[in-house]
Image: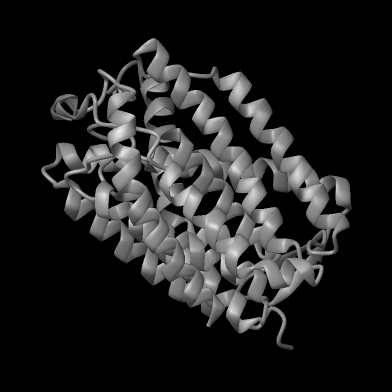
Amino acid sequence: MTTIWAGILAFAVSAAAGKLLIPILRAMKAGQSIKEIGPNWHQSKSGTPTMGGLMFMLACVVAVLALGWRDIAAGDYSALFVLLFALVFGVIGFVDDYAKVKKKENTGLTAGWKFLLQLAVSIAFLALMRYGGDLSPNLYVPFFNLSVALPWPVYLVFAAFVIVGCVNAVNITDGVDGLAASVTVPVGVFFAALASWWDKGAVGVFAGALVGGLLGFLLYNFHPARVFMGDTGSLFLGGAVCGLAFALDVPLVLITVGVIYIAETMSDIIQVGYFKLSGGKRIFRMAPLHHHLEMGGWGEVRIALTFTGITVAFCLLSFVGVMYRYLI
């Protein structure tokens, strides 16, 4: 029940924050610069306030501190660790967004700096969870209900790169109105349900807060968007999703619950690789996948709802695949 209350509180905070934050962002002229290589009709979105991810970030902080304090006081810091982990990624995104706003173009931190910062944060989080007793180097394999024991250094390197890859996959998914937030809602519900099923209430509080915060944000971000989450929000979301998967010690479930994140990223990789190998030919009309569908006549609402529906189906499948993790 606490998880549900966390969602309700986070929704209220996020929705209220939007009323205050959007005018402030407009006054700051914190508008999004649209890449010229994207669909030409996206140019009309130029100037839409960005950094709106601050809304659901604030919502998660309030909900976790207000409803998770008993777990924290009892020595269960898992929700707090996941929150701090996601917030640090959000700060990296905020720095990137702020640089873009100052320069009035769609480039912020260099790719190299982003990678190094994200890798360092990932390693620190994994080490903290490991030595806090919330994470083991035994890699659980969904659907087969077995674990593969790995040396801790091997697991650490593997897991750090999984996190960095997943976080940036969520960032790539944030390309049309409401898409990244809509897709992440069922992922958050999945982790909230899993935490409840396994009686890991502290993690469930954060997952519930994430869902509520995103629903509040979607009041302003669903098409036509009045605010974008920016890298501030998308990197926070990536950190939150990864943090939840590792806090529950089922990182491989990211493959199925994150099927849309993976599809978006792979479409980008395939497009660039094939373009270079073929001397300029393309497989997709435009990458990533959501732009390919846009170029084929799909509207932004259709893309967001279809991708969310696919995610719901894979989250249900994923629950079946991991539900017996701690119950045998």
Return the residue nearer the eye: 126 or 23. Answer: 23
The percent position of residue 10, horizontal first and vertical second, equals 45, 62
Looking at the image, which residue sits at the far bottom? 328
Location of residue 77 (image quadrant): bottom right
Q: Residue at x 41, y 14 (%)?
A: 102
Looking at the image, which residue sits at the far top? 103
Q: Is residue 109 above or below residue 251?
A: above
327 lies left or right of 143: right
The percent position of residue 265, horizontal first and vertical second, equals 44, 40
Residue 253 seen in the current view: no
Residue 219 seen in the current view: yes
Return the residue nearer the eye: 86 or 127. Answer: 86
Location of residue 37 (image quadrant): top left
The percent position of residue 111, horizontal first and vertical second, equals 55, 21
Q: Residue at x 47, y 18 (%)?
A: 99
Which quadrant of the rendered structure holds the C terminus?
Answer: bottom right
The percent position of residue 27, horizontal first and vertical second, equals 29, 25
Q: Residue at x 73, y 34 (%)?
A: 120
137 lies left or right of 241: right
Return the residue nearer the eye: 303 or 90. Answer: 90
How are the residues colored?
one colour
Looking at the image, which residue sits at the far left? 297
Marks counted in the figure total: 0
116 lies left or right of 20: right
